[in-house]
Image (tube, helix red, strand yellow):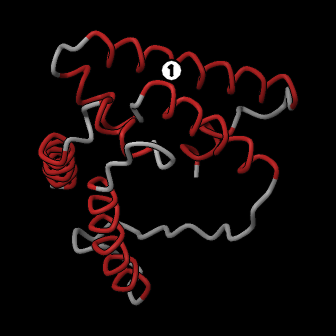
Amino acid sequence: MALFFAWMAGLIFGLGLLVSGMTNPAKVLGFLDVAGAWDPSLAFVMVGAIAVAAVSFQVSRTRTRSLLGLPINLPTARHIDQRLVIGSMLFGTGWGLAGICPGPALVLMGSGILKGAVFVMAMLAGMGLFERLERQKRPDSPGPISEKKAS
């Protein structure tokens, strides 16, 4: 049942990205061009997503399990550190150069658009590079992704 609802959420997310224009790199770049021909329409998409998430987070704070009976694990980090700042700058640079972020890239790739597939491959390469660098810093650690899977 959990897989079905995950599939449904992904379907709704993908449809929302397509309907809102978030998969169109030109539209996204227009949104990011705040000093030029700014297109504010994607701000409405973000506000809508934040509103839904805010309600969901409020409800989840009063529960220990989801409606499907799965444990609810809310984020606890509240500090801004160097890793967050550098990661945000890298993410923003990639988003600004390509006009694509991870969710829309998957939709584009699924639609058979080469730019989406190239972006996803580059994103996976970046994630692999990060994992390799993390393992080199801490040889006894399986890395952040592996640690999350184990918990």
* Residue denoted by label 1: 124
Q: Nearer the viewer, residue 131 or 142?
A: 131
Q: Secondary structure at mark 1?
A: helix
List x then y, in percent, for residue 118.
39, 11
List x then y, in percent, for residue 147.
64, 43
List x then y, in percent, for residue 14.
19, 42
Residue drawn where x is 44% and y is 24% of the image: 98
Vertical comparison of 74 with 42: above or below: below
Q: Quarter of the image holding residue 81?
A: bottom right
Residue drawn where x is 27% and y is 41% of the image: 22
Left/right of residue 73 with respect to residue 131 in the rendered view:
left
Mark 1: few/some/many CA within 10 Å (<14, 14-19, 20+):
few
The quarter in which the N terminus is drawn is bottom left
Vertical comparison of 95 with 74: above or below: above
Residue drawn where x is 23% and y is 30% of the image: 107
Vertical comparison of 7 with 142: above or below: below
Instruction: Pick out the residue farthest to the bottom.
Output: 62
Left/right of residue 83 with respect to residue 70 in the rendered view:
right
Q: Quarter of the image holding residue 127?
A: top right
Image mark count? 1
Residue drawn where x is 68% and y is 26% of the image: 131
Q: Nearer the viewer, residue 148 or 29?
A: 29
Q: Nearer the viewer, residue 136 or 125?
A: 125
List x then y, in percent, for residue 49.
30, 64
Amino acid type at image mark 1:
Leu
Q: Quarter of the image holding residue 28?
A: top left
Vertical comparison of 103 with 115: above or below: below
Left/right of residue 74 with respect to residue 77 in the rendered view:
left
